[in-house]
Image: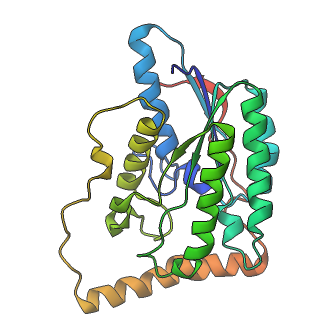
Amino acid sequence: MSWQRYVAIGDSFTEGMVDEHPDDPGAYVGWADRLAAQLASDARPKGRPFGYANLAVRGRLLADVAGPQLEAALALEPDLVSIVGGGNDILRPKADLDRIADELEAAVERIRSTGADVLMCTMANPKGAAVLRRLAGRMGSHNANIWGIAQRQGAYVIDQWGLRSLRDARMWGIDRIHLSSLGHERIAAQAYWALGQHTGERDWAVPLDPAPPLGRRESIAGHAAWAKEYAAPWVQRRLQGRSSGDEVQPKRPTITPLD
């Protein structure tokens, strides 16, 4: 399949946190940008045009992803849309998994009705993440819904849950919630494979060599620093009804060629 107009919608995962841009402080690259770069590289030698937009914004709930973001995406007339949403909804105490699934499927069905292909993504297994481990059952149920939606609607799926190499702490950023640059590279490579664009070795699935274990003192100090710098502000925003993306605009609001 050869796509020419790719639009990514979603939350912080698709915005690219925390895969920091080397030339633009405060900006992020992320798996979707990396996937788009690979698709653009494939198109270039064949003389095919390729453009990419990324409308994802951190902190967004599914209602925004499947609402305003989807409307803006469809107006760009894409032939490939990645939609990843619902993760922030699931973090909320009274998450309605059936409602989330219905809302997500309606969005996917609408995209597919235009003739565009859809790329979805499961949530990662929180087995090694103390802050999210208690939500494993809820996240697993959401993933099952994603696979069902994909089967019914003919969508492609990135399988984060089954990617055991992501259980390595080095795949995650300093905030312990978002992927590191290395993690985003792995997801982009798996996305490319999921789209049927690479049939060779699945290097993205190979775990890293073991890292030296942290000493007890170093581990405690690291956890304390994380709690102060990341966990506490996150809790405060939730209590105040604020989002980390309240003042953030999409980084690529229109389809443009990649350099």
Q: In the drawing, does residue 72 fall left or right of residue 159? A: right
Q: In the drawing, does residue 89 fall left or right of residue 189? A: right
Residue 226, compared with residue 242, is above or below; it is below
Q: Residue at x 46, y 7 (%)?
A: 47
The residue nearer to you, when weighing 85 against 237, is 85
- On the image, the x and y values in percent for residue 35 come to 46, 36
Q: Residue at x 67, y 48 (%)?
A: 149
Say if residue 198 shows up in the picture: yes
Quadrant hosting residue 22: top left
Say if residue 65 shows up in the picture: no
- On the image, the x and y values in percent for residue 173 come to 42, 64
Colour logic: rainbow
The residue nearer to you, when weighing 14 against 102, is 102
- On the image, the x and y values in percent for residue 152 come to 68, 42
Q: In the drawing, does residue 246 fall left or right of residue 137? A: right
Q: Residue at x 42, y 69 (%)?
A: 174
The residue nearer to you, when weighing 227 against 152, is 152
Residue 37, compared with residue 202, is above or below; it is above
Residue 201, compared with residue 141, is above or below; it is above
Quadrant hosting residue 171: bottom left
- On the image, the x and y values in percent for residue 153 come to 68, 39
Q: In the drawing, does residue 37 fall left or right of residue 221? A: right
Q: Residue at x 40, y 64 (%)?
A: 172
The residue nearer to you, when weighing 92 against 239, is 92
Please tell me how many numbered marks the rendered image carries. Answer: 0
